[in-house]
């Protein structure tokens, strides 16, 4: 859920962090949106790994017990 929410915070049209980054960097929203595309793709890949491969999700709990 946290990974999914992180993707939502940086994707338009409701990406709050996207608007903050555009304002702080004094760049147009379009420029910032184009710059985050590789990061969004990596985050979606990580979300798919965590969602569909239980070994990634359960590694730490099984390691510590």
Image (cartoon, rainbow, N blue to C red):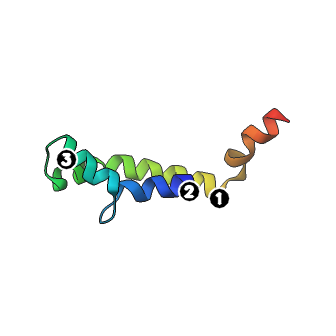
Residue at horizontal 54 percent and vertical 54 percent from the top: 47
Residue where numbered disc 1 is placed:
52
Residue name at image x 39 percent, y 52 percent: 40
* SS type, badge 2: helix
- Residue 10, position as x, y percentages in the image: 36, 54
CA separation in Å, label 2 and label 1: 6 Å
- 10 Å crowding of disc 1: few (<14), some (14-19), many (20+): few
Residue 8 in which image quadrant: bottom left
Q: Residues within 10 Å of mark 3 (few under 14, many from 20)?
A: few
Reply above or below: 63 against 18: above
Q: Quadrant of residue 24?
A: top left
Q: Earlier in the sequence, mark 2 or mark 3?
A: 3
Q: Residue at horizontal 62%, vertical 52%? A: 50
Q: Which mark is residue 23?
A: 3
Q: Is residue 32 left or right of residue 9?
A: left
Position of the N terminus, as image quadrant, is bottom right
**Where 65 sits versus 47, above or below?**
above
- Measure the C-alpha gap from mark 1 to mark 3: 36 Å
- Of residues 64 and 54, which is closer to you in this image? 64
Image depth: mark 1 or mark 3 in front:
3
Question: Could you tell me which secondary element the residue under label 1 belongs to?
Answer: helix
- What residue would you read off at disc 2? 48
Q: Disc 2 vs disc 3: which is toward the camera?
A: 3
- Tell me the tag on residue 15: none
Callout 3: helix, strand or loop? helix
Q: Determine contact: label 2, label 1, CB under 8 Å.
A: yes
Taking the image as shown, residue 37 lies to the left or right of residue 50, namely left
Q: Earlier in the sequence, mark 1 or mark 3?
A: 3
* Residue at the extreme bottom: 13
């Amino acid at each position: 859920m946290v990974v999914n929410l992180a993707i939502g915070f940086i994707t338009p049209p409701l990406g709050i962090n996207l608007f903050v980054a555009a304002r702080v960097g004094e760049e147009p929203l379009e420029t910032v949106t184009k710059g985050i595309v590789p990061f969004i793709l990596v985050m979606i890949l990580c979300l798919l790994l965590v969602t569909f491969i239980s070994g990634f999700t359960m590694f730490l709990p099984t390691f510590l017990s």
